[in-house]
Amino acid sequence: MTTTPPSIDPGAPAPRQLYRDPVYDGATDPTVVRDGDGQWWLFYTQRRATHHDPGPGVAWVHGSRIGVAHSDDGLRWRYAGTLEPSEDALVLRAGTPPLVVSETHWAPEVVHDGTRWRMYLTRIDGIPTRWEGHERHIVEYVSDDLRTWTRRGVVPLASDRVIDAAVARCPDGRWRLWCKDEAADSTTAVAVSDDLETWHRAGTAIGGRPHEGPYVFELGDWWWMLTDEWRGMAVYRSDDAESWTRQGGADAVILGDSGAAADGVQIGRHGSVVVTDGEARLYFFTHPWWDGSELADADERTHRRSAIHVARLRVVDGELIAER
């Protein structure tokens, strides 16, 4: 078992942290939106990082709910509760989530279609104790208020091993959904829809080195895709959100810097971008006290803890620059 250096207080704020989940200290995969009243909403995977008995293996990264937080400015956040299943819906409920759950919820993507909100959520049956051997699907929900979500069904995608949806309306007027396809060596698959009702598989958007957590957005007259390579984020640029070119070559990443665990500044992982009032913010998560060991099998709860951070994004001479 890895021991915690005396200089680290894992319960104390980490340098530069924006938000920590107050229940299990496992906030990951953040998605941020603003509602019609200007309030900011944060949706995230509530990993059970500090659960007293999460189960063996990687059970601690499963059995998760979607955590929700609110903010007036996108910088100071207050915990609002979790999205709990109720018949064919998810309902925001304050307080501590149930200790026993029957399914796992990961990586919510939330977009507004011009009429209402839509969520694309990764769902896994039960609480798996290992990565392999179980199906993962992306399920669509709709909402008028971001609090109650009605289930519409599973989105038919590249395989039954898909996670981490990203959805955007592209320059050709069509909607696209990108996701990690673990059945295709953990690369990014894409599906296309004219109306968000019927989806057509459209092959592989990003191949090569395994990755997860694609996110697509428009900034500075370009379309951008970020992918999490577990060593920082790869950046891809496009003029049509269909064909992508990697920025800086095969090994280039942003937010790839890390230091001693006591510094609390580690590799940027799976994030989302909000462009508002002329500013682009990249919300992402890190493991502040990580020491470089294998997180999936970590016995030390300190290293499992995670925090939401934010970086400013700018486009300079056609390149995306991230500033923590």
Image: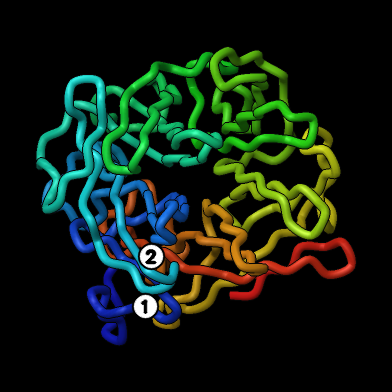
Going by the numbered disc 1, the residue's amino acid type is Ala
Front residue of this view, candidates 172 and 223: 172
Q: Position of residue 84 (x, y in %)?
A: 20, 36
Looking at the image, the residue that sits furthest to the right is: 317
Identified at 27% across, 70% down, the residue is 3
x, y percent for residue 96: 12, 51
Which picture quadrant has residue 70? bottom left
Q: Report which residue position mark 2 lands on.
A: 307
Dot 2, how many residues are within 10 Å of its Cα: few (below 14), some (14-19), or many (20+)? many
**Residue at (70%, 41%) from the top-left corner?**
209
Q: Is residue 280 left or right of residue 161?
A: right
Tell me if label 1 and label 2 are in contact, CB under 8 Å: yes
In this rendering, the answer to whether 144 lies above or below 10 is above
Distance between mark 1 and mark 2 Cα atoms? 8 Å
> Is residue 207 shown left or right of residue 300?
right
Write down the residue under mark 1. 14
State the SS at label 1: loop
- Colour convention of the picture: rainbow
SS state under label 2: strand
Please indicate, yes or no, whether residue 30 appears anywhere in the rendered image: no
Quarter occupied by the C terminus: bottom right
